[in-house]
Amino acid sequence: MKGFSRGIRVAIVFFLCGTFFLLMRPFIVSFFCIDRCSVQFVGQFNSDQKKSIESFIAKNNSCLNSSLSVAVKKIKKRFPSVKKVELFSNAQGITTASIESEKPLLKINEHFILVDNGMLLQQKLFDQNYIKDLKHLNFLNSDFISETFDFDDMNNEYVGKMPGIFLKTALHIPSFLFQKYKITCKSSSKWLLQDKTQKNFFILWNESKIPNESILNVCNEIQKNLVSRKKFLGKKVRDWVADVRFEDQIILFAKAGGQ
């Protein structure tokens, strides 16, 4: 009987300890600190950006001495190009950090990348072998942007946040337009297609009316007519603009200089 009683007491102790551990587990995870960390990367970061992130995690004392959740926030704050951070710790105190980059969608101007959350980031952060094949468009700091964009500070990852109205248009432009035309956004109501072979001919459109093949065919006929009339020859060639923002009509006008 004594042995049986002792066995029951041991079982009760184990049960209580296990219950206590389960109840305390969220607090243990919450206050667990990073001692040693290996880093794995997912996405399109280049080697320099990977080294910068690894160095920050390894050397930043405030990050290493934080709880896991706080460390994640600090990493993402320091590197806006990081989309997702997952931290996994083992019993030996070694943490593996899985760092995922934001997904590059478009090249903007000469030095910037539009990523899938609408931010503009520095192009130099990403793998050049990947972004060289991205579609490219030009963007002016337009009047429909409430935020001031910092195009000049090349040391800052984050440039600005693009509004939904821009994303809705830019991400729905057909691929064939990027092949034939240089595309520029001046404002929500002024987008330009510039013919890559005839740089003095433009098609003006807005966010609600991306030119389709039917409109482009008419514009091509207008361009051919201008060529036959030798409007693109001479020392002072004007820019010719076909405005397609109206229903059932295209307005052609000439500009003395740029747009």
Image: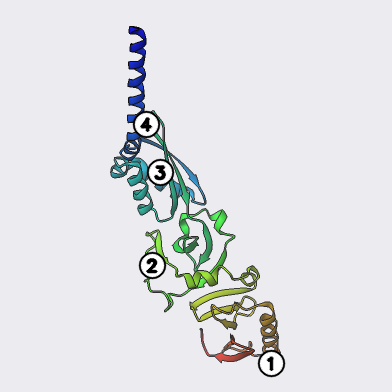
**Residue 101, image x and y in percent?**
47, 52
Compared to 103, does 236 lie above or below?
below
Compare marks 4 and 3 and give the one earlier in the sequence: 3
Residue at the spot 34% in from the left edge and 34% down from the top edge: 23
Q: Which mark is residue 116?
A: none
Residue type beneath disc 2: Asp
Query: Disc 2 versus disc 1: distance between alpha carbons?
Result: 43 Å
Residue type beneath disc 3: Glu
What residue would you read off at disc 1?
Answer: 229
**Residue 224, image x and y in percent?**
70, 86
What residue would you read off at disc 4?
Answer: 93
What residue would you read off at disc 2?
Answer: 152
Q: Quadrant of residue 66?
A: top left
Instruction: Give the foreground label among 2 and 3.
Output: 3
Q: Which mark is residue 54?
A: 3
**Helix, strand or loop under label 3:** helix
Q: Is residue 224 left or right of residue 209?
A: right
**Residue 47, image x and y in percent?**
48, 48
Compared to 99, does 25 lie above or below?
above
Compare marks 4 and 1 and give the one earlier in the sequence: 4
**Helix, strand or loop under label 4:** loop
Please rate how many residues cluster around mark 1, counting C-alpha atoms within 10 Å: few if below 14, some from 14 to 19, many from 20: few
Residue type beneath disc 4: Gly
Residue at the spot 57% in from the left edge and 59% down from the top edge: 132
Compared to 155, does 169 lie above or below?
below
Contact, CB < 8 Å: mark 4 with mark 3?
A: no
Contact, CB < 8 Å: mark 4 with mark 1?
A: no
Residue type beneath disc 1: Arg
